[in-house]
């Protein structure tokens, strides 16, 4: 079992961004960029334990949603014509994409074992197939090779993986929440991939003594007696699971007023963000945050709280500006909405 999400010390922005993305996957994923050893991978794997199970077509290799006919794979469409699709509850997939993974392992390839044994060409699904309707986690995402970045961009934009090689022609749904982590000292992220992340979190090593001591104490307690530590946090974890489920159910009914939309647009205009993806992401993230907090309507308070992770990675670089991107967003918020 992973370290409990509820037991993670500090890292409030990280936890908030991951919970918001869990409530509304359309936000576009989360980028966790910062110092080594700050719990980036721990937070992602802890989130996986909180996700409520989902309905999927029984025996489908891609975990298709039986209620979404438009997003069914070719195999499920063929079965649907013959009769109703049987569904089962399965865990939401959280799939790791290793840094050294080959393209065949990611997109899928010819199943050599079946080809040699039966003489038939068959498709062996890759990591993108396993991640459909779930989370795809890429550690050291800034070190990914360019051709793999291009591949992820294509699939993330279309929601579909198309494989045409070795006599195979296969397409299947591949809609996932992309979560990436990395250390900026080891290289920057390509702008095209950076723009695909809905939220970006800047993680720093805690500088106050009590927080550092608490982190060490909890981690040490977990490693010494994992079952006892998990039992200690079981109630808090259950509460978070229920909160995520309730928030997902509440999300379609959350209202967003014209004034709130205008406030989001004014903030993006003041910051000079390119395109309209900033407004869309900010509005969706604020709506998911409102759902998490049990509100009926998005207000400027929700915008303020989620604006920094939603917009910090969309700012144009200014070589004369010493302040970090997060500080620039906070400054613009205070100028527009008051300190």
Image: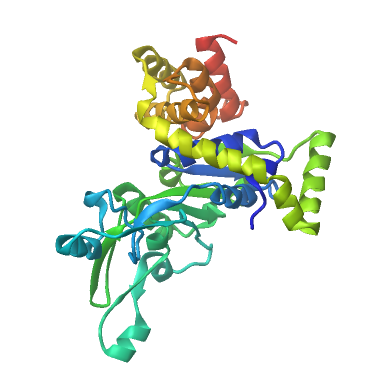
- What residue appears at the point 36 percent right and 59 percent down from the top-left corner? 63
Q: Point out the residue furthest to the top here.
A: 338
> In the picture, which quadrant includes the C terminus?
top right
Q: Quadrant of the N terminus?
A: bottom right
Could you say which quadrant of the image residue 85 lies in? Answer: bottom left
Q: Nearer the viewer, residue 73 or 40?
A: 73
Residue sitting at 36 percent across and 51 percent down?
A: 175
Inspect this view and state whether residue 161 appears. Answer: no
Q: Nearer the viewer, residue 34 or 147?
A: 34
Query: Residue drawn 21% across and 58% down?
Result: 84
Residue situated in front as seen by the camera: 267 or 250: 250
Q: Is residue 120 left or right of residue 201?
A: left
Give percent across and percent down for residue 31: 52, 43
Q: Is residue 163 above or below residue 286?
A: below
The correct choice, above or below, for 241 with respect to 318 in the image is below
Residue sitting at the far left: 81
The structure residue drawn at horizontal position 26% and vertical position 62%, both measured from the top left corner, is: 171
Image colouring = rainbow
Tell me: 161 left or right of 271: left
Q: x%, y% of residue 193?
A: 43, 46
Q: Is residue 185 left or right of residue 151?
A: right
Residue 270: x, y in percent?
Answer: 45, 17
Q: Nearer the viewer, residue 236 or 331?
A: 236
């Amino acid at each position: 079992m992973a370290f409990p999400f509820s037991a993670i010390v500090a890292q409030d922005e990280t936890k908030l961004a991951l919970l918001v993305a869990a409530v509304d996957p359309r936000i576009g994923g989360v980028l966790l960029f910062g110092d080594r050893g700050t719990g980036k991978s721990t937070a992602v794997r802890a989130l996986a334990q909180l996700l409520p199970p989902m309905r999927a077509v029984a025996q489908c290799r891609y975990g298709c949603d039986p209620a979404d006919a438009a997003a069914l794979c070719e195999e499920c469409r063929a079965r649907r014509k013959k009769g109703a699709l049987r569904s089962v509850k399965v865990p939401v997939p959280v799939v790791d994409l290793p840094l050294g993974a080959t393209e065949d392992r990611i997109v899928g390839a010819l199943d050599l074992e079946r080809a040699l044994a039966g003489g038939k060409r068959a498709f062996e699904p890759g990591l993108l197939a396993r991640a459909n309707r779930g989370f795809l986690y890429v550690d050291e995402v800034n070190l990914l090779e360019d051709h793999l970045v291009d591949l992820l961009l294509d699939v993330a934009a279309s929601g579909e993986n198309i494989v045409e090689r070795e006599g195979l022609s296969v397409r299947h749904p591949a809609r996932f929440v992309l979560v990436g982590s990395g250390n900026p000292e080891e290289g920057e992220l390509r702008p095209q991939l950076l723009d695909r992340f809905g939220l970006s979190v800047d993680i720093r090593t805690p500088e106050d003594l009590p927080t550092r001591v608490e982190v060490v104490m909890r981690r040490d307690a977990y490693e010494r007696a994992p079952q006892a530590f998990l039992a200690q946090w079981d109630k808090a974890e259950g509460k978070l699971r229920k909160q995520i489920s309730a928030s997902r159910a509440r999300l379609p009914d959350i209202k967003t007023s014209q004034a709130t939309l205008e406030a989001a647009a004014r903030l993006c205009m003041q910051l000079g963000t390119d395109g309209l993806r900033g407004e869309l992401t900010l509005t969706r993230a604020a709506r998911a945050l409102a759902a998490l907090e049990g509100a009926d309507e998005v207000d400027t308070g929700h915008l303020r709280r989620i604006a920094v992770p939603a917009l910090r990675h969309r700012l144009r670089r200014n070589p004369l500006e010493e302040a970090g991107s997060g500080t620039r967003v906070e400054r613009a918020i205070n100028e527009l909405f008051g300190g």
